[in-house]
Amino acid sequence: MTYLITGGAGYIGAHVVRAMTQAGERAVVLDDLSTGERDRVPAEVPFVHGSTLDRPLLDRLIREHGVTGVVHLAAKKQVGESVEQPLHYYRENVEGLRVLLEAVVDGGVRQFVFSSSAAVYGMPDVELVTEETPCLPMSPYGETKLAGEWLVRAVGRAHGVATSCLRYFNVAGTAEPELADTGVFNLVPMVFEKLTERRAPLIFGDDYATPDGTCVRDYIHVEDLADAHLAAARRLTEASETGENPDLTLNIGRGEGVSVREMVELIGEITGHHALAPTVTARRPGDPARVVASADLVSKELGWQARHDVRAMITSAWAGWCRRHPEAVAERG
Ligand code: UDP
């Protein structure tokens, strides 16, 4: 098997490249480097700089590298930005996927793993979100992921491509400091940034209907998430040998809720910055109170289960952060 990994120079993509190549799979990375970094991709993995909107490039790449499967992660992923730039998000995330799928079908590629998101659920009003929970995305970003799933499933059924859509919950941590997330758009790096500036971390609202009033999320270590891609790819390989299409749509989470306050306190403890108590500010518009996965289906279908806890996520993410921000390290007295 040779996998085309789009977005393989990004935070999650680079972890997928790492997991798949360490497991002995061949990979080629396509990335437009809009947010990715070239040096996240190991030198021995072929790297192509470009976009999934570039059909001639895709055709060439699939032919020249003998691509047999695709893991498609290249996408824009900021909720707020998607509200301001919906056309850009639909172009990159939906049109970019459509063009890629055309090249997949015409190039005879038989396997496709699609990077989706818990954002497809919007504001789920359930204790544990299952794959049957209705999808009501609350942002153009979530809409592009849901529309992407529809397209992937339809193409899989119509053209005999084995497919799997993976709905990521809240991703954190890193396998190596060099592969850490460089964006400051999520809770963990946003708290790290405040602590680095010796300022109080912010909690966006503590009047939600949750045990401590702050939002509850399901955090998943990026290394576990990457292993889920490998497990999905292997499952699709088995399936394509028999001509079956597993047509899987799976939550990738731990099935365990952690509140924002719990996260902020744990981050304070692990980083040594516990003296900086958090400040509670107004709710952030559009935040659901609780989004926690049921991880039963993925465990049944792929035999996959998360191995790392929240402490491991924060510890590894902090090592990555301190590599770029040496001034962040707390003076321990
Ligand atoms: N959050 C917070 N303070 C911050 C950053 C995030 O209280 O500095 C909260 C945010 O309101 C949400 C949770 O942390 O309830 C997770 O936010 P994130 O953006 O990481 O992921 P989301 O679940 O929104 O995709």
Image (spheres, helix red, strand yellow):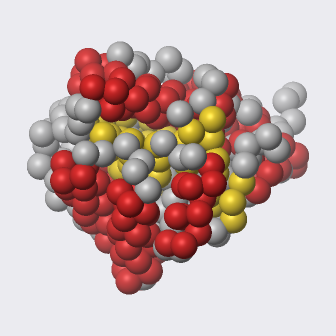
| Residue 240 figure quarter | top left
Count of marks placed on residues: 0
Whether residue 305 is visible here, answered yes or no, is: yes
x, y (%) of residue 199? 69, 55
Task: Give the camera-side residue of 139 and 68.
Answer: 68
Q: Is residue 34 above or below residue 48?
A: below
Residue drawn 87% across the image and 46% down it: 326
Instruction: Report the residue at 43% width, 62% height from top.
Output: 103
Q: At 42% across and 48% down in the image, what residue appears?
A: 109
Does 256 appear above or below 65?
Answer: above
The image quadrant that residue 193 belongs to is: bottom right
Q: Position of residue 78 (x, y in %)?
A: 47, 65
Q: Above or below — where is 25 with respect to 289?
A: above
Residue 204 is situated, as x and y percent measured from the top left of the image, at 43, 56
Query: Seen in the image, is 102 located left or right of residue 314?
Result: left
Q: Nearer the viewer, residue 295 or 99?
A: 99
